[in-house]
Image (cartoon, coloured by chain):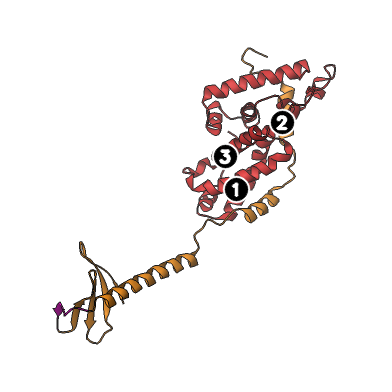
């Protein structure tokens, strides 16, 4: 062996290579099956995502409804030929449209109108 | 570095949560990783440790930035897991009279790799394995084990000296 220890006995290296290639007890196919059984699904499920969106929408609708009940519609703030607009809360206005369903609009006071709900 | 060439598409699919793609990648690396683990822990434990490491890799897959480096990344996880297991449980308990066999026997008969490895520190086993079996450079080994290249050289030197002494002297 040289002083750097770089010439490991060749027979040892050869034996080591052979030993490292021993047939495993668990083959590739078995490994795949084991992993599929054991690794958790990380993919977000579309149904779960839809349920989340639906829950958020329902919550928003309830909040708007509660707010409008807590604060009954004010006298109209805008009145036009086809619609009447009421302020029903700090961030909600009610628009009554001729020939259409009434709609509630959520308003961001700092940025103007942002979304709507019914 | 003789890591299996990775199908980056498979890696991308695995990162997106495709379990089939991940298990296919794991199967492609299985024997290589198992050989590494065998050099660090016992044969019996190696398969268990590698499977646990693969499950850990699946959980951490989101942190892999370079899909082309999947093989090296996996090697790092398995190497760290096996070294840690070897240190924690002292799998390689020294065996009395370790040697390799009687000094009079032929060199080939005196070489029992697993018995020789008993005498090395887990990190020395890992460095020697990655050098001899995988043909990695010092830089790649350093990356895989999270140590500097000078530490890689030092571990290899000490490990090789120890093994060569045992083989040539036939003592434990």
Secondary element at tag 1: helix
The answer for how far apart the CA atoms under marks 3 and 1 are is 10 Å
Question: Quick one: which chain is orange?
Answer: A
Total marks in image: 3
Element class at badge 2: loop
Residue marked by disc 3: B77
| Chain hosting mark 3 | B
**Where, quadrant-wise, is the N terminus of chain B in this rendering?**
top right
CB atoms of marks 3 and 2 within 8 Å: no
The residue at the point 52 percent across, 24 percent down is B149
Q: Is residue B149 magenta?
A: no
Q: Where does label 2 land, which residue?
A: B92
Q: Is residue A91 visible?
A: yes
Pointer 3 or 2: first along the chain? 3
Binning the other alpha carbons within 10 Å of mark 3 as few (below 14), some (14 to 19) or many (20 upward) gives: some
Q: What hue represents chain B?
A: red
Lower position in the chain sequence, tag 3 or tag 1 = 1
Q: Nearer the viewer, residue B165 or B4?
A: B165
Q: State the image coordinates of residue A65 (x, y, percent, origin top left).
A: 31, 76
Q: Is residue A74 magenta?
A: yes
Pair 1/2: label in front: 2
Part of the protein shown in magenta: A73-80
The residue that mark 1 highlights is B55
Up-down relation of residue B5 to residue A64 (above or below): above
Earlier sequence position, callout 1 versus callout 2: 1
Give the quadrant of residue A107.
bottom left
Q: Write down the chain letter for disc 1.
A: B
């Amino acid at each position: 062996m040289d002083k750097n220890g770089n010439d490991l006995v060749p027979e040892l290296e050869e034996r080591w290579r052979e030993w490292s290639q021993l047939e495993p007890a668990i083959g590739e196919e078995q490994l795949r099956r084991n992993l599929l059984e054991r690794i958790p699904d990380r993919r977000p499920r579309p149904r779960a995502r839809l349920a989340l969106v639906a829950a958020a929408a329902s919550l928003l609708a309830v909040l708007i409804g509660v707010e409008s009940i807590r604060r009954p519609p004010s006298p109209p703030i805008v009145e036009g030929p086809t619609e009447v607009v009421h302020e029903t809360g700090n961030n909600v206005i009610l628009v009554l449209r001729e020939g259409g369903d009434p709609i509630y609009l959520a308003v961001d006071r700092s940025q103007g109108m942002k979304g709507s709900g019914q | 570095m003789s890591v299996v060439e990775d199908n980056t598409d498979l890696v991308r699919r695995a990162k997106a949560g495709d379990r089939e793609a991940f298990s296919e990648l794991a199967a492609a690396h299985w024997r290589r990783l198992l050989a590494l683990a065998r050099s660090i822990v016992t044969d019996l434990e190696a398969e268990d440790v590698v499977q646990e490491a693969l499950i850990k890799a699946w959980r951490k897959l989101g942190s892999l930035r370079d899909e082309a480096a999947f093989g090296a990344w996996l090697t790092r996880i398995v190497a760290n897991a096996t070294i840690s297991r070897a240190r924690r449980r002292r799998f390689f308990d020294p065996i009395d009279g370790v040697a390799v066999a009687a000094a009079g026997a032929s060199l080939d008969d005196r070489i029992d790799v697993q018995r020789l490895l008993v005498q090395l520190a887990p990190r020395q086993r890992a460095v020697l394995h990655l050098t001899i079996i995988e043909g990695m450079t010092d830089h790649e080994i350093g990356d895989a084990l999270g140590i500097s290249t000078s530490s890689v050289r030092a571990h290899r030197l000490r490990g090789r000296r120890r093994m060569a002494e045992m083989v040539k002297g036939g003592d434990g």
